[in-house]
Image (cartoon, rainbow, N blue to C red):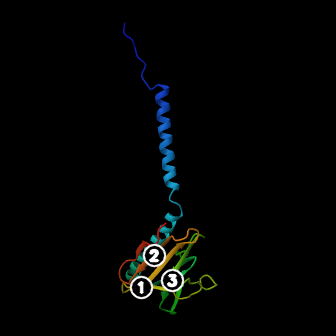
Amino acid sequence: MTVVRARGFTLVEVLVVVVIVGVLAAAVGLVATARGDGYALREEAERLAAVVRLLADEAVLDNREYGIRVSAQGYEMRAYDNRDGRWHAQPGWAPRQLPDNLQLLLEGAVVALPASPGADAAPQIVLSSSAQWTPFSARIKDTSRHGLVYRIDSDGMSEPLVQQVSPP
């Protein structure tokens, strides 16, 4: 007489797998939320550097001057209109508003946008169609965490360099 053995997993084996999957899911969740404000600060610094690189490429491709107007709360991209000789915000280029705890400084001094949004004030960083731009040094700091600062530097010809200038 042949004995047929049941195939499958026991309840204990299934529970062990469920516990392992739960522990792994919790670990992934902790890593994802552990980035915190320091991560947001670095991300904003990298984003500003990427905007400079993008506008520099666009300026060459479009044979047009572009600029970035900086304030303590964020920045906005502008384009120069040769017909009227003024800087204008472009449709589709939304101003970048920094989170409340982050502050952007250009060349060590806090600068402010004009009171009226969309005003045609000249940008502090100008990117020309000749593949050069205004040399600048910008800092993004976390006002809620003392000492955490990222610096974005460019000499006007090479890509912006992002680096942390103070320990977390």
Q: Nearer the viewer, residue 92 or 29?
A: 29
* Quarter of the rendering containing residue 115: bottom right
* Distance of label 1 from label 2 (alpha carbons): 13 Å
For the residue marked with disc 3, what is the amino acid?
Gly
* Quarter of the rendering containing residue 144: bottom right
Residue 160, compared with residue 22, is above or below; it is below
Q: Secondary structure at mark 2?
A: strand
Residue under the image location 43 percent in, 19 percent down: 6
Residue under the image location 48 percent in, 30 percent down: 14
For the residue marked with disc 2, what is the amino acid?
Arg
Q: Secondary structure at mark 1?
A: loop
Residue position marked by numbered label 3 in the rendering: 108
How many residues crowd around disc 2 within 10 Å: few (fewer than 14), some, or many (20 or more)?
A: many
For the residue marked with disc 1, what is the amino acid?
Pro
Residue position marked by numbered label 1 in the rendering: 135
* Distance of label 1 from label 3 (alpha carbons): 14 Å
Q: Which mark is residue 151?
A: 2
Residue under the image location 42 percent in, 79 percent down: 153
Whether residue 48 sits left or right of residue 103 in the image: it is left
